[in-house]
């Protein structure tokens, strides 16, 4: 075997070993000094075997061990928190000083304008001791503040100070959800600051303006130039295609791009960097420039594009991969693309090992690996098709095969329309991006010509949007695909490598097995199908999911035969720009394969209980919605009543009972509303779910007067598990009520560091007095309760220490 091939394969192997070492260190509690010892032993083995030419196999094994331990050590070093980290001051009131490194304007639906700042923290002092020297700190802090609390035009590069409370980063902790806290930490953001007053400008940026501020101002000028010749929504889309980001893009457009598998177009990725690189290579060869000069110009172009795109982590990854690929092309080593892939992987993980948990990183490398491993062989299989069609289908198929477990885990779908979209829409988009970049370069030098270019982009973009909407509306454009667990993923990739012939020669290919034993293959297939069918119809336990929706309530119950019922849907309390039902609850349901609801109970109409219902109706068929009888419907309830997908909507009455697969849902308490919608807590219905000897009581936001009425009427509320009323407020869960329910377990659905002080210490004390085990979604994340009718097991997503 040629030495170049050995080195190429070795780079891939050691990069994979480094990645596995990082993954292992993230899963296990590892003693760092022990890793150093093992790493030294592996390094010694490499030195010994490298001197013996007849021990090549052992040398490879030693290198794999060395890079495995090196990956584990690098990860533990990266995640260690320095003693100066700003997050160590969480829970304390401070005056923070630092430099603004990022600024974003937050405005939605006519609401009050807010600014979000990312501040590189330098020091902090205590509010009662400002004269004392500041404590040096490191790390970035995120803070959001109303526009009226920004006394000057604070911009990137400016030094500011702000008084407030440092709080830890926190997200929605649900299975299958993207870890937003880890994503922020990878960007260096370590904590949040809750401002207690206006920001104070200490010093303008040195030299008048920072490069980030210059870049942001220049981007705004470009967008203004776009909006002069094209509608603002299309300008937002073109800006997203060139610079990345979804700001100003309608939810419908984003959904269409997701359905057709083109959502990566709206965020700067390897596709964009490769497009710029290919365009520059083509121009250089067109003008017959020397290869070295072409390489330099192309490298400058892709680096410049990465800078104006923001040099975010995904852009930086794309740049490293692009420059590595460019080097392979310039040195005419295209056959060593696998080595370039391995080298890029090794470099990026060495710089930032936490990237291994980043969704865009995982998808980028899975897609690249798919193209390297499966593209050429798939083209060969499709050789009877026209060349261009075979290439597009093979590229799409190779990418989707490699990334399928990831897309199933994070998105729970498979885009069938992506094949057509890649053939029809992608070439148009590539032309729009290149033309848009030309227009961007002309904005400062020839604004009139830039306007003509943008106008042409607008015409083409209209056709792209129409084609994307049409493809997304096709039947089965995107189908549900269940998430795969770790063992199934391993089997899937082993099977994939087997089908593509990457196993050693003694292992037969599927076609050879079929030719040799056709009868046995048929019998095995029939038996496997029968076993699969039996698993699908075999009764499962009842599972109650308490979803982490922050300061709100949302729960879903699945029956032994897979039917589903929801009790409340959560909803954002403040800004309407974040649809919690769309972005938290619906993905949770998809992750667990819930594609239809038999019943949806809304205990009352407050936003934090019913605000996500409309989004659920947008995506999931709901056979019947049961609503509380309130004096006046809230905005959230009206959205359900007038929804285009609404089916049956009926009021809840005391004594209503529904039975599904042996699970009984009883409306224990349903008062008629006599107060205004703003006082709707007292109209909260109480729902009891029973299966065998086990029962769960949902109390919505019921407060003490309602609890007293239930006790006076001696209604059947005794239950094994209590969903604590009103997020654990002091005015709910009275001692008498808890004594009547007598729960062994209680779940409190509550937002992290909420402004209401929930759950209240008195409520927690009353629960503790009854020896009730308490789980809180702000600490445990989503809580899954599994029961077979005799026993009950509680599985929190996070274990509260």
Image: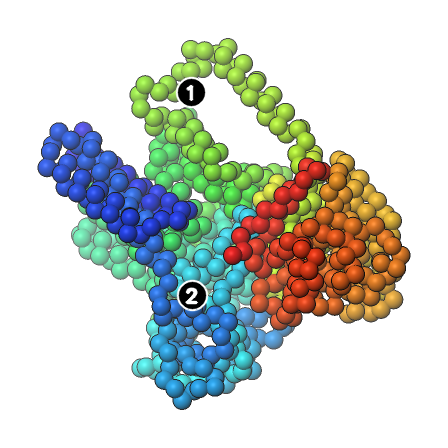
Residue denoted by label 2: 189
Q: Secondary structure at mark 2?
A: strand
User: On the rendered image, what quadrant is the N terminus found in?
Assistant: top left
Q: Is residue 725 left or right of residue 343?
A: right
Residue 546 shows up from this direction: yes
Circle 1 sits on which residue? Answer: 510
Which of pointers 2 and 1 lies earlier in the amino acid sequence?
A: 2
Apparent side of residue 675 relative to residue 95 in the rendered image (left or right): right
Task: Check disc 2: other Cα within 10 Å, few if <14, some if 14-19, many if 20+.
Answer: many
In terms of secondary structure, where does tag 1 sit? helix
Q: Residues within 10 Å of mark 1 (few under 14, many from 20)?
A: some
Label 2 and label 1: CA atoms lie apart by 49 Å
Q: Between residues 144 and 792, which one lies in front from this camera angle? A: 792
Percent position of residue 682, x then y:
81, 64
Residue 351 is left or right of residue 461, and the answer is left
**Residue at x 36%, y 68% (from the top left corner):** 83
- Where is residue 163 drawn, in percent x and y? 49, 81
State how the image is colored: rainbow
Name the residue: 79% across, 55% down.
Answer: 740
Q: Is residue 113 above or below residue 61?
A: below
For residue 726, which numbered disc appears in the image? none
Q: Residue at x 45, y 50 (%)?
A: 359
Task: Please identify the quarter of the rendering in which residue 98 is found.
Answer: bottom left
Q: Nearer the viewer, residue 21 or 516?
A: 21
Name of the residue lying farthest toward the right: 713
Q: Position of residue 637 (x, y in %)?
A: 76, 59
Q: Is residue 404 visible?
A: no
The residue most toward the bottom is 131
State the image coordinates of residue 596 (x, y, percent, origin top left). 69, 42
């Amino acid at each position: 075997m040629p030495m170049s091939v050995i080195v190429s394969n070795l780079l891939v192997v050691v990069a994979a070993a480094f990645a596995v070492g990082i993954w292992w260190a993230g899963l296990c509690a590892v003693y760092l000094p022990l890793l150093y010892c093992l790493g030294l032993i592996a390094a010694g083995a490499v030195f010994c075997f490298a001197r013996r030419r007849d021990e090549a196999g052992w040398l490879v094994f030693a290198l794999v061990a060395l890079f495995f331990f090196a990956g584990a050590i690098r990860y533990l070093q990266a995640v260690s928190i320095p003693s100066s980290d700003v997050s160590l001051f969480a829970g304390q009131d401070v005056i923070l000083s630092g430099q603004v490194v990022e600024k974003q304007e937050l405005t939605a639906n006519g609401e009050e304008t807010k600014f979000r700042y990312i501040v590189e923290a330098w020091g902090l002092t205590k509010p009662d001791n400002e004269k004392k020297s500041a404590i040096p700190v490191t790390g970035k802090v995120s803070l959001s503040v109303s526009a009226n609390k920004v006394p000057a035009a604070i911009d990137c590069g400016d030094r500011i100070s702000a008084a407030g409370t440092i709080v830890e980063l926190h997200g929605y902790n649900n299975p299958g959800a993207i870890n937003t806290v880890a994503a922020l930490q990878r960007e260096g953001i370590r904590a949040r600051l809750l401002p207690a007053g206006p920001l104070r400008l200490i010093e303008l940026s040195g030299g008048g303006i920072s490069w980030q501020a210059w870049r942001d101002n220049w981007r705004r000028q470009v967008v203004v130039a776009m909006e002069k010749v094209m509608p603002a929504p299309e300008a937002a889309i073109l800006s997203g295609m060139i610079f990345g980001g979804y700001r100003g893009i309608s939810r419908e457009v984003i959904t269409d791009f997701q359905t057709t598998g083109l959502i990566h177009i709206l965020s700067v990725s390897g596709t964009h960097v490769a497009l710029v690189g290919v365009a520059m290579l083509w121009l250089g060869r067109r003008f017959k420039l020397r290869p070295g000069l072409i390489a330099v110009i192309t490298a400058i172009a892709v680096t410049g594009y990465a800078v104006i795109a923001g040099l975010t982590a995904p852009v930086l990854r794309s740049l490293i991969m692009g420059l590595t690929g460019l080097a392979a092309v310039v040195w005419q080593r295209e056959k060593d693309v696998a080595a370039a892939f391995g080298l890029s992987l090794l470099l990026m993980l060495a710089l930032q090992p936490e990237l291994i948990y980043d969704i865009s990183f995982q998808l980028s490398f899975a897609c690249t690996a798919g193209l390297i491993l499966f593209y050429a062989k798939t083209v060969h299989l499709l050789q009877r098709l026209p060349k261009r069609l075979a290439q597009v289908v093979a590229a799409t198929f190779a990418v989707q095969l490699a990334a399928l477990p990831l897309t199933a885990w994070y998105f729970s779908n498979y885009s069938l329309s992506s094949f057509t979209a890649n053939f029809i829409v992608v070439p148009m988009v590539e032309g729009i991006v290149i033309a848009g970049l030309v227009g961007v370069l002309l904005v400062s030098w020839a604004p009139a010509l830039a306007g003509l270019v943008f106008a042409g982009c607008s015409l083409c973009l209209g056709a792209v949007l129409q084609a994307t909407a049409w493809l997304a509306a096709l039947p089965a454009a995107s189908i549900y695909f269940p998430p795969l667990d770790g063992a199934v993923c391993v089997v899937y990739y082993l099977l994939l490598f087997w089908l593509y012939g990457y196993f050693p020669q003694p292992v037969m290919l599927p076609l050879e097995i079929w030719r040799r034993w056709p009868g046995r293959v048929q019998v095995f297939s029939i038996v496997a199908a029968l076993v699969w069918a039996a698993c699908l119809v075999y009764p499962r336990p009842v599972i109650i999911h308490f979803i982490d929706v922050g300061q709100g309530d949302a729960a879903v119950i699945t029956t032994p035969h897979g039917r589903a019922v929801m009790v409340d849907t959560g909803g954002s309390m403040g800004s309407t720009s974040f649809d919690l039902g769309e972005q938290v609850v619906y993905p949770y349901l998809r992750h667990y394969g819930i594609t239809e609801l038999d019943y949806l109970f809304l205990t009352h109409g407050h936003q934090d209980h019913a605000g996500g219902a409309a989004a659920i109706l947008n995506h999931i068929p709901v056979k019947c919605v049961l609503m509380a009888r309130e004096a006046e419907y809230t905005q959230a309830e009206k959205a359900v009543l007038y929804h285009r997908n609404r089916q049956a909507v009926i009021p809840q009455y005391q004594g209503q009972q529904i039975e599904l697969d042996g699970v009984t849902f009883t409306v224990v308490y349903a008062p008629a509303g006599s107060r205004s919608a703003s006082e709707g807590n007292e109209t909260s219905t109480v729902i009891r779910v029973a299966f065998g000897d086990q029962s769960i009581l949902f109390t919505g936001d019921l407060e003490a007067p309602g609890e007293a009425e239930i006790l006076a009427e001696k209604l059947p509320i005794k239950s094994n598990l209590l969903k604590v009323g009103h997020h654990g407020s002091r005015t709910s869960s009275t001692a008498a009520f808890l004594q009547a329910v007598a729960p062994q377990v209680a779940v409190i659905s509550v937002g992290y560091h909420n402004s209401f002080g929930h759950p209240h210490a008195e409520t927690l004390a009353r629960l503790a007095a009854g020896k009730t085990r308490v789980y809180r979604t702000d600490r445990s994340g989503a809580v899954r309760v599994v029961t077979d009718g005799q026993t009950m097991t509680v599985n929190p997503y996070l274990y509260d220490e």
